Image: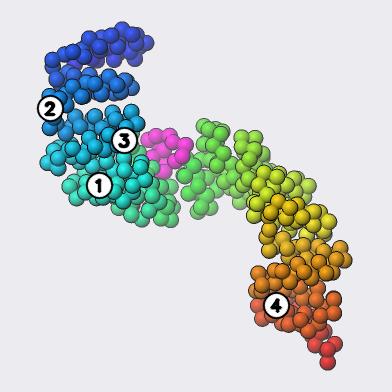
Amino acid sequence: MQKIVDAVHKIENGEVDQGLAQLEELENTTNHETKFELAETYYSLGHIDKAKKLVDDLLMLYPDEGELYTFSAELLIDQDQEDEAIEMLLEIKEDDPAYLRSLLLLADLYQMQGLDEVAEQKLLKAIEKAPDEPIVSFGLGDFYLARGDFQKSLPHLKKAYYANVEMEGLNIALRLAEAYSGTGEYEEALKLYQEGLDQQLDIHALFNYGYTAYQIEQYELAIDQFNTLKELDPEFSSVYPYLAKCYEALHRLEEAIKIINEGLSVDQYNEELYVHGGKLSFKMKNREKGEEYLREVIAINPSHFEAVRTLAAFLKHENRFDDLIDLIEYLKDIGEGDPVLTWYEAVARYENDDIDKAKECFEAVKADFADDVDFLEEYGKFLMENGERIESLRLFKQVIALDETRLNVKELIIYLEEDMQ
């Protein structure tokens, strides 16, 4: 209706009060088609209460009109009245033209409430009723995609995609790309990400595009996507670790560490960035900075498994046994324990001539590392140097049984066997 068009035009051009007043004049119209169009206009403008009142009036006149029920349900959803919306949709009869739409809306509502099995039943019913309807195929495919069931989502999303029908607000190419990526079909996914992003820029799709390229070691392509995303939304903290990893894979370590620091300026509690920064710094021979990164993440989260082990291994490698013991004692004090740390403590205690404590630590974790050649070799040497030659010989033979390339251990076995004859 022209009056509605004129009113909307005024609202869009800043004459909001005049446009709304013009719409309000039409609310008492006796023309039911005009009233329905007015309700749709209010809905599009975000005036949900006004739209709902008009739809309720029409429902009094047309109590069997399914389209009014679905419209009313959509309005109820916007008013956060999901249960009432479900009741409204369940009123629609199966022979009503709006029944298919009601099934899709019900599936969305049940999924929102965590009732995935019920939602799936509604979508399967919709597929049964309209197997060639692209929006239904898309709905079922998108449902499986949201659940991470990529293999199930693929045929339905492909059907919707190849129907070549535009669906307002839906980017089928990007959804299909995500499904392909989830099933490991990365090349297909990359093509569709590019197509979908050409249609509509989406930061989450940019991240997924970059991540897919990263998975198949197309690092330059991944860097392009991640940098575009970073420029669009610098606060998207998940992009920084992967962008740094891409630069590292290309041996561009200075750029990688720069990205680490950029990410930390955005998210100072990002544990992954600290750990990666530590490892990168060690790789760049900057031991002091590497230790600083790791101590930062341990201060944030003392139970960070990888950070604790990496720092402990570094201190052990550097023969900083007092610092290693201090770290382990601190972690013990706050209730953090780890068999690897107990092993390292055994080595540190022995180096500090605390033989009894070292033996206690080795014994405490020997069952945990019964098949670890490094542990067995270190414990064997400790026992040999402290007079327990029979047990050390047994451990050395166990090492060779696991790894016969350890020539130094073979020499120790020969030495012990000759010495014990």
Distance from disc 4 to disc 3, alpha carbons, whole Å, reads 65 Å
Q: Residue at x 73, y 55 (%)?
A: 332
Badge number at residue 82: 3
Residue ranking furthest to the top: 18
* Start-end of magenta stretch: 192-205
Q: Circle 4 — which element? A: helix
Numbered disc in front, either 1 or 2: 2
Badge number at residue 399: 4
Numbered disc in front, either 2 or 4: 2
Mark 2 vs 4: CB contact within 8 A: no
Quadrant in the picture for residue 36? top left
Q: Circle 2 — which element? A: loop
Residue 325 point in image, percent of width and height? 79, 57
In the picture of the structure, the residue carrying the numbered disc 2 is: 62
Q: Amino acid at mark 4?
A: Val
Looking at marks 4 and 1 on the same chain, the residue that comes earlier in the sequence is marked by: 1
In the visual, does 65 lie left or right of 273?
A: left
Q: Amino acid at mark 1?
A: Lys
Looking at marks 1 and 2 on the same chain, the residue that comes earlier in the sequence is marked by: 2
Q: Residue at x 87, y 66 (%)?
A: 353
Distance from disc 1 to disc 3, alpha carbons, whole Å, reads 16 Å
Looking at marks 1 and 3 on the same chain, the residue that comes earlier in the sequence is marked by: 3
- Judge by depth and name the residue closer to the eye, 192 or 24: 24
Above or below for 51 versus 208:
above
- Judge by depth and name the residue closer to the eye, 224 or 368: 368
The local crowd at label 1, few if under 14, some if 14 to 19, many if 20 or more residues have their Cα within 10 Å, is: many
Badge number at residue 122: 1
Q: Amino acid at mark 2?
A: Tyr
